[in-house]
Amino acid sequence: MRFLIRVIINAFAIWVVTLIDPLQVDVIPFPPGETLQMVLTLLAVAAVFAIVNTIIGTVIKIVAFPLYILTLGLISLIINGFLLWLTAWLTHWWQWGLRVEDFWLGVVAALVITLINWILGIFLRPQLKKKR
């Protein structure tokens, strides 16, 4: 259930980022490119992004732990931008997917996605039941 909520929040965040024109981030929908195909493409890209964050992001964060300390966590912006760029690279092999034109604009887009995930995660995160 958590993964599904995370994918839906990621899909919404990626959609919002595609609406911000200067970031040059686009989603190429499944053919024929109507609304349903766009939603399915956003969900597929969000699932790939969540898997990349979970697997590769965790490994990078463990290896780069000293850099986190040295930069007081600011390296996470670069790592998140790299993970977004990696997601775009993984989905560019098909005729659908995420397109990020510039790495540094991808870093800004990843920052926006992170902020949206954080804000929506506060409200939509499944609450643990308290034991009495």
Image: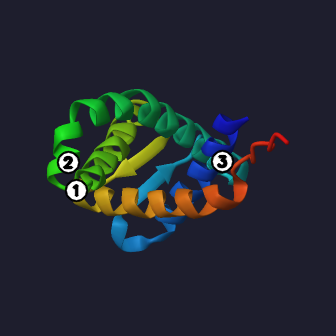
Q: Disc 3 vs disc 1: Cβ atoms closer than 8 Å?
A: no
Q: Percent position (x, y) of residue 31?
A: 60, 41
Q: Amino acid at mark 2?
A: Ile
The mark closer to the camera, 3 or 1, is 1
Q: Say which label, 3 or 1, has the lower sequence index.
A: 3
- At x 56%, y 46%, the residue is 29
Name which quarter of the figure residue 130 lies in: top right
- Alpha carbon separation for disc pair 2 and 3: 32 Å
Q: State the residue position of label 3.
A: 8
- At x 62%, y 49%, the residue is 33
Q: Considering the numbered disc 3 on the image, is that residue within a helix, a strand or a loop?
A: helix
The answer to which of 40 and 70 lies nearer the viewer is 70
Q: Amino acid at mark 1?
A: Leu
Q: State the residue position of label 1.
A: 72
Q: Amino acid at mark 3?
A: Ile
Image quadrant containing the C terminus: top right
- Alpha carbon separation for disc pair 3 and 1: 30 Å
Q: Disc 2 vs disc 1: Cβ atoms closer than 8 Å?
A: yes
Q: Percent position (x, y) of residue 119?
A: 58, 64
Q: Which mark is residue 69?
A: 2
